[in-house]
Image (cartoon, rainbow, N blue to C red):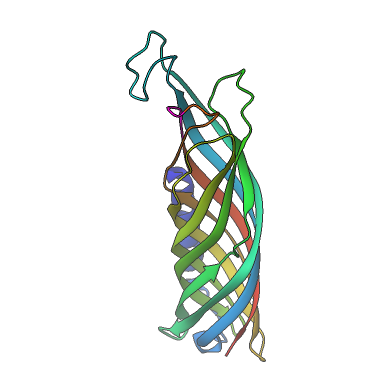
Amino acid sequence: MKALRTKICTYAIALLASIGFATPTLAGSSDFSGIFIAGHAELNVVAIDGSSTTPGQGETSAGTGGSDNTETTQGTIGGFAPTAGYELGFNLPLGDTFFITVGYADGGGKSAAIAKVDDGAPTSGTDVSLHASNPSWWYIAPAISIFDNSAVYFKWGQAHADLKAIGDVIGGPNNIEGDLWGIGTTSIASNGLFIKTEAGAIQYDQFKITGIGGNASSIVEGNPLVGYGHVSIGYKF
């Protein structure tokens, strides 16, 4: 994830710097100034790098109390999760061509299955799915206007999602927070309508699930990484 974050930041800085040196005289941050509201749709690709720890027969989760060894399995699981929701915020001009966007986005309350998980035992036949719901994020996005009606921006924010494990499981996962990075473009019409296109990634904190497959001592842990493509259409007041 560090390498991906470094690439996104490097590309964003290089793009914004090159545009800053080549900005035409028609560019204007005032075209974007004001409060806005928008609807958005996203396609999310989820990859979860994690591990599954299953104590041997008679053991506790600390690995004591039995004769069999604790088994730990590592791997990557994931899936696709389309989302849609709303976004609101404001654009604050800080110069002729530079402005900052501060906003909040909600991905909708619908639950989406993002992965299947198990206790790591090859013969357990465990059927458990991990679902995410209520994704949301606050963000700040410095931008440079390149024409009267177009701008490019780099986004950083804090994301949140609720997790739920459904199936043969005793305990539930914790909800997760994460860091968001993105880069995108926005175009606005004279009547206030605008469209944004964006790509980025969210690195969430670790989650933990206990009791997979009815084994109260089994533990599954994971670090979700989400890559996304985002389109929003809205109106600036």
> Count of labels shown?
0
Visible residue check, residue 17: no
Visible residue check, residue 217: yes
Measuring from the top left, give residue 139's x and y in whole percent.
Answer: 45, 68
Relative vertical location of residue 23 with respect to residue 127 in this rendering, above or below: below
Task: Please name the residue shown 46% across and 70% down the image.
Answer: 141
Q: Quadrant of residue 218?
A: top left
Viewer-closest of 196 and 215: 215
In the rendered image, which quarter contains the C terminus? Answer: bottom right
Is 132 covered by the magenta stretch? no
User: In screen coordinates, is 133 left or right of 21?
Assistant: right
Measuring from the top left, give residue 89's x and y in whole percent.
Answer: 50, 79
Viewer-closest of 22 and 61: 61
User: In screen coordinates, is 6 left or right of 233?
Assistant: left
Viewer-closest of 203 and 101: 203
Task: Please name the residue shown 40% across and 83% down the image.
Answer: 94
Task: Please name the residue shown 52% across and 60% down the image.
Answer: 182
Relative vertical location of residue 231 with respect to residue 93 in this rendering, above or below: above
Magenta range: 216-220
Measuring from the top left, give residue 214's x and y in whole percent.
Answer: 53, 29
Relative vertical location of residue 7 with respect to residue 208 in this rendering, above or below: below
Task: Please name the residue shown 60% across and 85% down the image.
Answer: 148
Q: Main secondary structure of the magenta part?
A: loop
User: In screen coordinates, is 153 left or right of 86?
Assistant: left
Relative vertical location of residue 55 with respect to residue 100 in this rendering, above or below: above
